[in-house]
Image: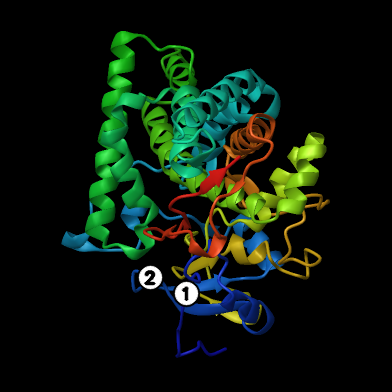
């Protein structure tokens, strides 16, 4: 079976949208597994259909490579190894760490955070209303969608909010890794790892505390426990990479989707018990990411008629899979009552995102508080005039002018 000579570029997101790129509709129909040139110049197999993308996430022949090991370099050019994030751990190590961490992110265990997240959301809405020039207009991104996820992350995990100017720039660099040089990516990764190590040292000196870092650190220091201090460092890096900017961008995009579908928003306001179902649809409809899931084949195999070789990069695209009409009826339409809704916004299989329930809780609470406190909220400008932050693959509105 011959390998294709011509490469397609990874489809670009249309300016002023979160995606997914419209080009994925053609790929799903004609080339569901196709070689593409990735933003950093490397080659990878794009997987655009739901069935194949879902299977790829759970395929043991496909592993997520270390950021410090992909693209591969050998000899003197090989960078020093970095600790694996939770997404990159494999085998028994991954199972052991996941067993320790997963219970903290279950629905039942997260219930203790519900009132605190609600209190943070209410405080931000009160401040937004109080600071509005005429009392009835504000930027929903700067006042609400941006500060809420960071505050939730800091309080849940135990990250110092006052350190945000230290760790956030490195986090943003890593989120754009697919389009950056290896040197830029590694510098940010090592800096973030060093920050996490220093934070753990401070906590070991000053006391563990009752947040997630503290709980894991206490477990790691328990005699005979197999969780290690390095695992806690990896946890901090993982949460910063997966739990910060992605939630900010998705929250902004989700709120824009609601505000541009006023009839559905009105029905949700009248029947708030449907917010959980609405959140699942927003996770399906609004991309958490477009094409930044790099997996590497550990052996040769055939996928949808294409010959995948050991070492090849494979890139399942949840944003495209979640719009697959073979899986979702009228897939390009937002339907806040859609059920069932087996989207793969958080991936699938052993490496599915452990923070998915926290993201759901945060988004549901953000919507619930807005609709309760500002029932008349609407866009203050035409949607097509809103400027966009397109500095990373996680596209989102730069501002959301609203009135109420």
Taking the image as drawn, is residue 348 in sight? no
Earlier residue among tags 1 and 2: 1
Seen from the viewer's position, the closer of residues 158 and 304 is 158
Q: Judge whether 83 appears above or below 119 on screen.
A: below
Percent across and percent down for residue 232 are 41, 28
10 Å neighbourhood of mark 2: few (<14), some, or many (≥20)? some
Q: Position of residue 354 (x, y in %)?
A: 58, 38
- In x, y percent, where is residue 71? 34, 64
| Snapshot quadrant of residue 333 | bottom right
Give the secondary structure at mark 1: loop
Whether residue 108 sits left or right of residue 381 in the image: it is right
| Quadrant the N terminus occupies | bottom right
Residue that label 2 marks: 39
Instruction: Tell me the quarter of the image containing the C terminus.
Output: top right
Is 90 placed above or below 239 here? below
Question: Mark 1 and mark 2: span between their CA atoms?
Answer: 7 Å
Residue 10 tag number: 1
Q: Quadrant of residue 206?
A: top left
Q: Please tell me which residue is depicted at 49% across the width and 31% down the height of the picture.
A: 128
């Amino acid at each position: 079976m011959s390998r294709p000579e011509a490469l397609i570029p990874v489809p670009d997101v249309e300016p002023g949208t979160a995606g997914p790129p419209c080009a994925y509709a053609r790929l799903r129909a004609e080339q569901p597994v196709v070689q593409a040139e990735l933003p950093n110049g490397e080659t990878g197999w794009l997987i655009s259909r739901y069935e194949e993308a879902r299977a790829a996430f759970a395929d043991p022949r496909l592993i997520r490579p270390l950021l410090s090991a992909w693209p591969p370099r050998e000899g003197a050019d090989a960078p020093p190894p970095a600790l694996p994030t939770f997404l990159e751990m494999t085998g028994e190590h991954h199972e052991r760490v996941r067993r320790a961490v997963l219970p903290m992110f279950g629905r039942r265990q997260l219930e203790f955070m519900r009132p605190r997240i609600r209190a943070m959301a209410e405080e931000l809405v009160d401040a937004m209303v109080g600071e509005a020039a005429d009392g009835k207009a504000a930027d929903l991104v700067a006042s609400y969608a941006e500060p809420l996820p960071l505050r939730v992350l800091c309080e849940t995990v135990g990250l110092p909010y006052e350190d945000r100017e230290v760790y956030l720039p490195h986090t943003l660099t890593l989120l754009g890794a697919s389009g950056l040089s290896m040197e830029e990516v590694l510098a940010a990764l090592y800096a973030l790892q060093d920050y996490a190590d220093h934070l753990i040292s401070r906590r070991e000196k000053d006391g563990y505390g009752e947040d997630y870092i503290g709980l894991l650190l206490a477990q790691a220091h328990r005699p005979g426990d197999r969780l290690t201090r390095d695992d806690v460092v990896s946890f901090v890096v993982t949460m910063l990479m997966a739990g910060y900017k992605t939630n900010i961008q998705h929250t902004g995009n989700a709120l824009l989707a609601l505000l541009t579908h006023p009839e559905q928003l009105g029905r949700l306001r009248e029947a708030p018990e449907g917010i959980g179902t609405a959140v699942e649809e927003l996770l399906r409809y609004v991309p958490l990411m477009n094409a930044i899931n790099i997996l590497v084949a550990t052996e040769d195999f055939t996928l949808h008629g294409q010959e995948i070789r050991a070492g090849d990069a494979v890139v399942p695209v949840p944003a495209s899979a979640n719009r697959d009409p073979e899986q979702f009826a009228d897939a390009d339409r937002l339907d806040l009552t859609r059920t069932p809704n087996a989207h793969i916004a958080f991936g699938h299989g052993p490496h599915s995102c452990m923070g998915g329930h926290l993201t759901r809780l945060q988004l549901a609470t953000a919507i619930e508080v807005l609709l309760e406190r500002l029932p008349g909220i609407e866009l203050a400008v035409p949607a097509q005039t809103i400027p966009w932050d397109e500095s990373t693959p996680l596209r989102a509105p730069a501002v959301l002018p609203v009135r109420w």
